[in-house]
Image (cartoon, rainbow, N blue to C red):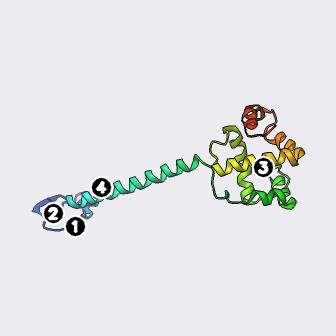
Amino acid sequence: MLMSCRRTSQGSCNAQGPSKEVGPTLISRQPAFDQDSVHLQRFSSQIVFPPEENFIIVKMKFVAALFVASVAVLAVEAADQYTTKYDNIDLDDILKNQRLYKKYFECLTNKGKCTPDGKELKEHLPDALKTGCSKCSEKQRAGSEKVIKHLLKNKPSDYAILEKIYDPQGSYKKKYEAEAKKLGINV
């Protein structure tokens, strides 16, 4: 139930009883002059909503909070896996084409510019080595295996250069040696 208010010349409020207005009511407190000290008093404005509109506002706030929470959960889940945006790149084409291979190799060794997918690889390679590729998709794991086998068989000197950059102490080599042997990779 809403009460309406009528301002008196002294700035006080005389209650008028229940208001029949529907929707938000603005109770405006006009500045009042104090005749004795001649200064301006300010009162704040206030919006009062009927109970049924309060429910709608609470419901809207709940929906907004639920939306924000959902976005936060999706952001956390997305951070638990590397992007799969470049999973459909044909690795065989890159490994067979010396010009393409050289671009990626120079990117990883900080000797050339990176393509967007090369930049992504370079950015996540240290973390992938550290975590055992725990954030990799299945396609990324299979691609890693294919590239490592190719480097060891066809470009061992390039593998050694990459190893000096990304595993200078040889800790990852020791860590993954048994797993590599299971996959038929002799490191």
Q: Where residue 178 appears, x then y in whole percent?
A: 74, 32
The numbered mark, 2 or 4, whose residue comes first in the sequence reads: 2
Residue at the image point whose x is 76% and y is 33% from the top: 177
Number of numbered discs on residues: 4
Could you tell me the amino acid type at mark 3? Val
Could you tell me the amino acid type at mark 2? Ser
Determine which residue is flagged by label 4. Answer: 58
Front of the two marks 2 and 4: 4
Could you tell me the amino acid type at mark 1? Gly
> Which part of the image, by quadrant, shows the C terminus?
top right
User: Judging from the image, what secondary structure is the residue with disc 3 in?
Assistant: helix
Judge left or right: residue 73 versus residue 2: right
Could you tell me the amino acid type at mark 4? Val
Determine which residue is flagged by label 1. Answer: 23
Front of the two marks 3 and 4: 3
Q: Nearer the viewer, residue 187 or 103?
A: 187
138 in relation to 182, above or below: below
Report the Cα–Cα distance between label 1 and label 4. Answer: 16 Å
Residue at the image point whose x is 67% and y is 56% from the top: 87
- The answer to whether marks 3 and 1 mark residues whose Cβ atoms lie closer than 8 Å is no
Front of the two marks 1 and 4: 4
> Which part of the image, by quadrant, shows the N terminus?
bottom left
